[in-house]
Amino acid sequence: MPLKALFGTFDSIMMHGILKNYRRGRNTQHPTQYIVEVDGIETRAKASTLNGKKVTWKSVAEKAITGKIMAAHGNSGAVRVKFDKGLPGQAIGTRVSVSE
């Protein structure tokens, strides 16, 4: 049976990613915006298809903080995510889930 029949379209599959770092420049850091590398996304074109999707980070206490993918970041498939409120510094390097 084809994967599309099992899981539906590409958009309906739950994906995961890793928080890599804050969005930052040489002298500034944006504490509510993060760079996320999504599993299975290797190009800017594929990353652009994720714009507007919801990203959820769960703390150890199962408290969820949600954000939204704003744009692609670079040419290697990373995306920029803006969260509703800032995440703790310990969140860098942890996993997030990407959904509709």
Image: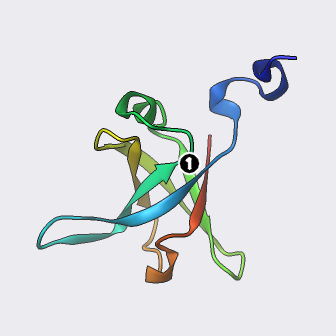
**Left or right of residue 71: residue 25:** left
Q: Is residue 77 above or below residue 80?
A: above
**Left or right of residue 18: residue 59:** right
Image position, residue 94 (x, y; %): 56, 69
Residue drawn at (78%, 23%) of the image: 3
The residue to which callout 1 is attached is 54
| Residue furthest out toward the left | 27
All told, the count of numbered labels is: 1
Residue drawn at (53%, 42%) of the image: 53
Mark 1 residue type = Lys
Q: Is residue 66 above or below residue 94?
A: above
For the residue pair 87 and 90, the one nearer the viewer reads as: 90
Where the C terminus falls, by quadrant?
top right
Image position, residue 95 (x, y; %): 59, 63
Task: Name the colour scheme.
Answer: rainbow
Q: Is residue 69 above or below residue 92?
A: above
Label 1: which secondary element: strand
Image position, residue 99 (x, y; %): 63, 44
